Amino acid sequence: DAKTTQPNSMESNEEEPVHLPCNHSTISGTDYIHWYRQLPSQGPEYVIHGLTSNVNNRMASLAIAEDRKSSTLILHRATLRDAAVYYCILSADNYGQNFVFGPGTRLSVLP
Amino acid sequence: DSGVTQTPKHLITATGQRVTLRCSPRSGDLSVYWYQQSLDQGLQFLIQYYNGEERAKGNILERFSAQQFPDLHSELNLSSLELGDSALYFCASSVGPGGTGQGEQYFGPGTRLTVT
């Protein structure tokens, strides 16, 4: 299974943009890149996903490198509510959806 | 609120016992996924069902089994419980069968299982 590497933790100031990196050098051509986050005491929450092109939604933007070996989740203006563990995941197979969650990046947002 | 419900919220039981965790997916979702989250192992995928059929299997122990019923709710059965089975168990649902093009899984609030 293709694996991802993320920093263990990051800090941001409130109202500033946050760039969360993810390396996935062994990604296959059919793997989508998914981002989820888990707020304290809650289940994971979908953030965004993409294949090759950059993606935007109401929560965040996903910037995917041209060689697809890395990606960056961008939160445009961090709020205190964005403090969570962020997981970068690659789809493991084409048939079902077998997500392999790594340890993720714990984002702290400072007021 | 994701629309996925799980019962019970908390469960305390003894080693060797058997428990059943229940999950109701979002209205209209056909896939149900089960995950286990423990402090030392992180979030691990266990199994996926799509419209009543097993679709994908992860690190699910033989002591664990699951099924999805005609009304699309799912149950995860854990038997011969051990101390190491203490964890948060999450259920998630999605509209389709999964596959690389489908991103959104909606997670429930989880069931916290404590084995003493």
Image (spheres, helix red, strand yellow):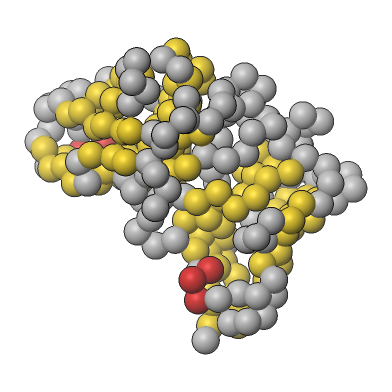
Specify whether A33 is left or right of B98.
right
> Which picture quadrant has residue B8?
top left
Residue B85 is situated, as x and y percent measured from the top left of the image, at 26, 36
Q: Is residue B44 left or right of residue B74?
A: right
Q: In this orientation, does residue B67 appear?
A: no
Q: Position of residue B49 (x, y in %)?
A: 44, 21
Residue in the image at 68% along x and 30% along y:
B100
Instruction: For the N terminus of chain A, give its image quadrant.
Output: top right
B48 lies above or below B107 = above
Where does the image place residue B115, in percent across and percent down from the top left? 16, 40
The percent coordinates of residue B87 (x first, y second) are 29, 43
The residue at 43%/43% (across/down) is B107
Q: Is residue A69 left or right of residue B4?
A: right
Number of residue marks: 0
State whether residue A94 is above or below residue B53: below
Question: In the picture provided, is B44 more to the left or to the right than A107?
Answer: left
Determine the residue positioned at 42% across, 48% down.
B2
Q: In the current view of this chain or complex, which residue is farthest to the front?
A: B28
